Amino acid sequence: MPLYECMLLMKPTVEKVALIDLVAQVGRHAYRRNGVITDIKSFSWVFLGYAIKKRDGRYYKGQLMQMTMMAPPSFNKELHYLNKEDQLLRWLLVKHRNTIYGLDFLNDEDGKRDLLNYPRVGLYNMKDHDEDDGDEDEDEYAEGMEETK
């Protein structure tokens, strides 16, 4: 299944509950097609580069949501019900192309070479240089205390 990004630009007058309901509706639609939602981001209020004219006025800002999902290729043809949503200013579905996922990435020779470029240092293997500095400070403090006596 290919990876898709779905951008939803809502009217600024729409309440958060209605915004979440629309995102959940798109998510349920992907889930019914055996899709998986991998990420949801809210960009809150965004100012638009140009006004979007709708029947009830012009809009210069909106609420932007981004959903990343894996869905079957026929998914984009099934989202046309979003055109009838009064709360939406615009929506966009972008398909990621030439992307390798999961075990296919590790089995690919290019993918193995890419992973070797990263250092093999974990969180627990790193030395903390602050510990060494603390010992020197304690020695200087002890010497200073002896001199004052």
Image (cartoon, rainbow, N blue to C red):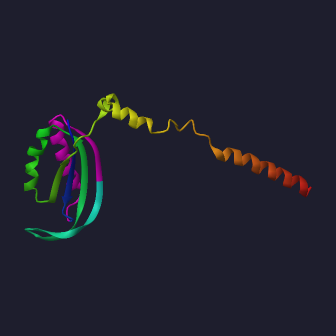
Q: Is residue 58 above or below residue 17?
A: below
Q: Is residue 128 left or right of residue 34?
A: right
Examine the image and state in which quarter residue 61 appears.
bottom left
Q: Quadrant of the N terminus?
A: top left
Q: Is residue 42 above or below residue 105?
A: below
Q: Position of residue 92 (x, y in %)?
A: 17, 53
Residue 103 in which image quadrant: top left
Depth check, front residue: 98 or 139: 98
- Number of numbered discs: 0
Furthest residue in direction right, as rendered: 149
Is 26 displayed left or right of 100 in the figure?
Answer: left
**Residue sitting at 19 percent across and 70 percent down?**
50
Magenta stretch: includes residue 107:
no
**Quadrant assignment, res 37:** top left
The magenta region covers 13-41
Q: Residue at 20% across / 43% down in the picture?
A: 27
The quadrant in which the C terminus is found is bottom right
**Image location (x, y in percent) of residue 132:** 70, 45
**Along the viewing direction, whichever of 101 and 7 lies nearer the viewer:** 101
Residue 99, position as x, y percentages in the image: 26, 40
Q: Residue at x 49, y 38 (%)?
A: 119
x then y, percent, for residue 47: 26, 68
- Residue shown at 70%/48% (left/top)? 133
Q: Is residue 18 magenta?
A: yes
- Name the one closer to the observer, 60 or 125: 125
